[in-house]
Amino acid sequence: MANAPEQVRAQARGRSIDGEFRQLFTIMSTRSFRHGTSTGGEQPYYIYDYPPAEELDVRQHIENLIRDLQQITPADADDYAPRILHLDLYADVALPILEQRHVLDRLLEREDNMHGTVSANPQTDRFLNVLIGALTGDSDVTARFIADRVNEARAAHEADIVFLTGIGAVYPYMRAHLLLENLQGYVDDCPLVLFYPGTYTQGSASGSSLKLFDALENNNYYRARRLLNMPVDD
């Protein structure tokens, strides 16, 4: 039986990132996607899940996708090329929040003495426990921060679609399913796409789940749409 890394590599070999990003471009180019007319009144949240082994390739494709979307020529006179707000959850969200709360420098200075046991369990890793408290102890702090960035960009006509990346870099002090749940009510009026290194299995409400890196435990989440499953219509 193949071990876990070999299974991940096999999965990556079975997919075409080039082809998938061409599909993403086609989907995001449609008016129905950009105006949220096909969501049935639900939040226009989407997940593009991809093999973790393709992380570096996906990063470059994201930059190319942003460029290509912002350069499209709309088919209709009343349409427009969308502006993309790209937020990296580590560099553009987590670090600025820690700086705003005046804890970043102290955390960096004391990290070596705070770990004890380096762990994904905040009960045994004090450093992780402090990070979680600063970033998600108040369940709305990260959502409010992201919403402020989105509202500022939308006021400047620079956020027709929001891309969130870097969820792997902020694990385990930020979790994808909790982040998306907390964003509801804060970011509702423009499409939001989470790029997810792992697997989003979409089924019934109780059967949909996110599995980060294709290795960690499943987290139930069902409100977002898997982007590759979206129909291409206009």
Image: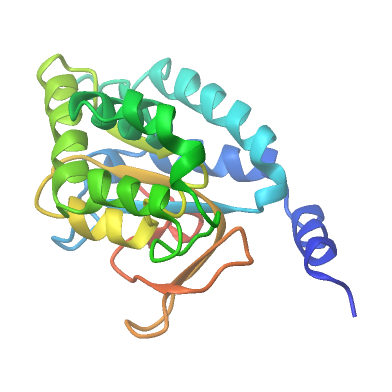
State the quadrant of the C terminus: top left
Foreground pick, 233 / 143 = 143
**Residue 210: x and y, percent?**
47, 67
Residue projecting furthest to the right: 1
Foreground pick, 12 / 90 = 90
Residue 90 placement: quadrant? top left
Q: How is the image coloured?
A: rainbow
The correct choice, above or below, for 194 with respect to 100 in the image is below
**Residue 49: x and y, percent?**
53, 54
Q: Judge from the rendering whether residue 207 lies leftward or rightward of residue 201; answer left or right.
A: left
Q: What is the tally of numbered marks visible in this picture?
A: 0
Residue projecting furthest to the front: 113
Q: Judge from the rendering whether residue 199 lies leftward or rightward of residue 15; answer left or right.
A: left
Q: Judge from the rendering whether residue 202 lies leftward or rightward of residue 20; answer left or right.
A: left
State the quadrant of the N terminus: bottom right
**Residue 126: x and y, percent?**
39, 53
Question: In this view of the protein, can residue 166 be seen by the observer?
Answer: no
Foreground pick, 120 / 23 = 120
Residue at x-position 84% and y-position 71%? 3
Residue at x-position 61% and y-position 58%? 213
Residue at x-position 45% and y-position 24%? 66
Residue 149 placement: quadrant? top left
Residue 189 placement: quadrant? top left
Question: In this view of the protein, can residue 111 be seen by the observer?
Answer: yes
**Residue 156: x and y, percent?**
14, 14
Residue at x-position 33% and y-position 45%? 131
